[in-house]
């Protein structure tokens, strides 16, 4: 092996008498380096953007959700609150069920008669009343040992009054309202000002967090207004005074610019009484589950499904990972398709670039015919000759990968300057901050580096085998006779 490495080194080092071969080899290195640089930079930026989007998505919505099914809403457990005085004759949200002292609040002496078409009370194996919500939280705690929180969604009309000196104006927006995920370990990174909870102002008005796009409409922190929604009992408009407690980054979800984060109390009240929006009730409430490694989402889902089966609550809940969220599924699939397409295009370009290796090594073989014949006459095997030129091919690939990787690292390290230059050339921002953030990702993707360091030398090796096999099949007698 030492002989083959030494000979390959000798052939690859530029020499004045082999200027044409040296130039073609350098051209091969340059072309492959250029492709590696562009491909690695693009894949790293795309990977960083995807991670950023997923971080925002799972910070607000959690990587895993547990939603009640229609069987839950038709169950005795859910309906019994509507005929119970202890529950004020109103059904409870999942959060209220979690905090409730009673599994079955029905009083046979004072409450109205239960309709005959209702299902029987849910029982566990010991014949005791089954608390579906508390059993679900217990299963989550047993399986994931991470943060979990109930959530509620509803709809309302937001109207903010902007007072700027003597000038008054209004901002009106039909909006979705969802519970502020204060149990999320990363939600604070999305807020304009980190906070553990949304506190009321001096007037006692509850605060809301609104998308940062509202800042473009002149909204400021502290602005006051109200939420307008319909009452479930009277159908009349109800107003709830609120103030802007801060802004948050909703990411690129389609409903993001219309989604307000509100305290738990507001979300629960409007979820029960609000009629401004008609939402799918199986999606408008549920349990959010957070964990550190998003790659474990499917495994945790499987464990939870098994635990729900054992506890007898599986028919009452569906478990969904972020891959299947209705508001994000299409976007994530399209992003994966785009990344796969550009990766495929990059590999094709790498293969085309590697064809230069074939040309340069064939010229090298023709230039070294006499030396190859002498080596074979002295006892060098065909495998040894093949190895020499194969090492030349893989060396070109490795050198190109390393130089291209270094160029990609330097580019990403100065990505903000690159974006500023491109924006200057275009006359407007190259990348929309609402979609890509204030700056592009500036770190190399580990997966992309692995892909490049494996694919490029491998393609180069395969390209080098063509002239290597040609060189090994030369007969010393034919070579010397032609000389």
Image (tube, rainbow, N blue to C red):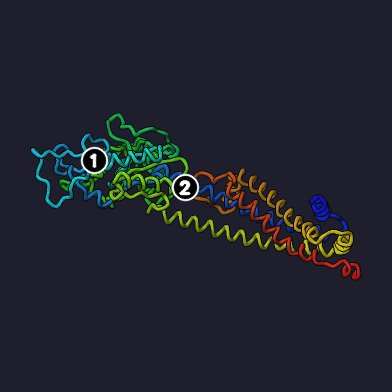
Q: Position of residue 377 (x, y in %)?
A: 89, 62
How many residues crowd mark 2 within 10 Å: few (<14), some (14–19), many (20+)? many
The disc, 2 or 1, on the residue closer to the chain's N-terminal end is: 2
How far, Cα to Cα, is label 2 from label 1?
46 Å
Residue position marked by numbered label 1 in the rendering: 126
Does residue 175 show up? no
Q: Residue at x 80, y 64 (%)?
A: 472
Question: Which image quarter is the C terminus in?
Answer: bottom right
Residue 467 marker? none
- x, y percent for residue 126: 24, 40
Residue name at image x 52 percent, y 50 percent: 431
* Residue at the farthest left position: 109
Location of residue 283 in the rendering, given as x and y in whole percent from the top left corner: 31, 50
From where the camera sits, is residue 95 visible? yes
Task: Name the front one of labels 2 and 1.
Answer: 1
* Closer to us: 94 or 308: 308
Residue 91 coordinates in the image, percent (x, y): 20, 43
Looking at the picture, tell me which residue is in the foreground, 454 or 124.
124
Q: Is residue 455 left or right of residue 198?
A: right
What secondary structure is marked by label 1? Answer: loop
Task: Pick the residue in front: 310 or 470.
Answer: 310
**Residue sitting at 88 percent across and 61 percent down?**
371
- Residue bearing the label numbered 2: 53
111 to the left or right of 451: left
Q: Decide: marks 2, 1 in contact (CB < 8 A)?
A: no
For mark 2, give the secondary structure.
Answer: helix
**Total numbered labels placed on residues in the image:** 2
Q: Residues within 10 Å of mark 1 (few under 14, many from 20)?
A: few
Is 99 left, or right, of 348 in this rendering?
left
Q: Residue furthest front?
A: 126
């Amino acid at each position: 092996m030492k002989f083959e490495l030494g000979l390959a080194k000798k052939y690859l080092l530029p020499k004045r008498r082999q200027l044409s071969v040296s130039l073609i080899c350098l051209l091969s290195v340059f072309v492959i380096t250029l492709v590696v640089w562009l491909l690695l930079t693009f894949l790293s930026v795309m990977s960083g953007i995807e991670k950023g989007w997923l971080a925002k998505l799972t910070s607000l919505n959690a990587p895993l959700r547990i939603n009640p099914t229609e069987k839950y809403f038709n169950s005795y457990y859910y309906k019994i609150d509507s005929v119970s005085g202890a529950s004020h004759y109103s059904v409870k949200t999942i959060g209220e069920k979690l905090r409730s002292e009673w599994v079955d609040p029905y009083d046979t002496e004072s409450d109205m008669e239960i309709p005959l078409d209702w299902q029987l009370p849910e029982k566990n194996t010991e014949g005791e009343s089954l608390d579906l919500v508390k059993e679900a939280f217990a299963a989550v705690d047993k399986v994931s040992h991470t943060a979990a929180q109930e959530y509620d969604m509803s709809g309302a009309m937001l109207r903010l009054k902007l007072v700027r000196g003597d000038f008054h104006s209004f901002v009106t927006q039909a909006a979705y309202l969802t519970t502020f995920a204060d149990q999320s370990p990363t939600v604070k990174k999305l807020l304009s000002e980190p906070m553990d909870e949304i506190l009321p102002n001096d007037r006692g008005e509850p605060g809301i967090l609104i998308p940062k796009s509202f800042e473009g409409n002149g909204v400021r922190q502290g602005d006051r207004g109200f939420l307008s929604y319909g009452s479930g009992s009277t159908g009349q408009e109800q107003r709830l005074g609120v103030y802007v407690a801060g802004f948050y980054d909703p990411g690129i979800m389609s409903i993001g610019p219309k989604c307000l984060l509100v305290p738990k109390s507001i979300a629960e009240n409007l979820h029960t009484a609000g009629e401004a929006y008609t939402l799918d009730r199986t999606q408008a409430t549920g349990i959010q589950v957070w964990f550190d490694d998003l790659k474990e989402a499917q495994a945790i889902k499987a464990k939870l499904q098994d635990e729900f089966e054992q506890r007898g609550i599986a028919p009452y809940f569906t478990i969904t990972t972020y891959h299947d969220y209705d508001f994000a599924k299409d976007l994530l699939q399209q992003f994966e398709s785009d990344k796969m397409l550009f990766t495929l295009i990059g590999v094709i370009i790498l293969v085309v670039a590697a064809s230069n290796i074939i040309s340069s090594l064939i010229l090298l073989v023709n230039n070294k015919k006499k030396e190859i014949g002498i080596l074979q006459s002295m006892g060098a095997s065909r495998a040894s000759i093949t190895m020499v030129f194969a090492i030349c091919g893989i060396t070109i690939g490795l050198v190109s990968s390393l130089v291209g990787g270094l160029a990609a690292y330097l580019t990403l390290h100065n990505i903000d300057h690159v974006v500023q230059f491109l924006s200057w050339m275009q006359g407007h921002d190259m990348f929309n901050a609402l979609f890509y953030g204030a700056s592009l990702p500036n770190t190399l993707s580990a997966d992309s580096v692995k892909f490049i360091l494996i694919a490029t030398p491998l393609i180069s090796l395969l390209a080098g085998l063509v002239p290597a096999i040609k060189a090994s099949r030369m007969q010393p007698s034919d070579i010397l006779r032609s000389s």
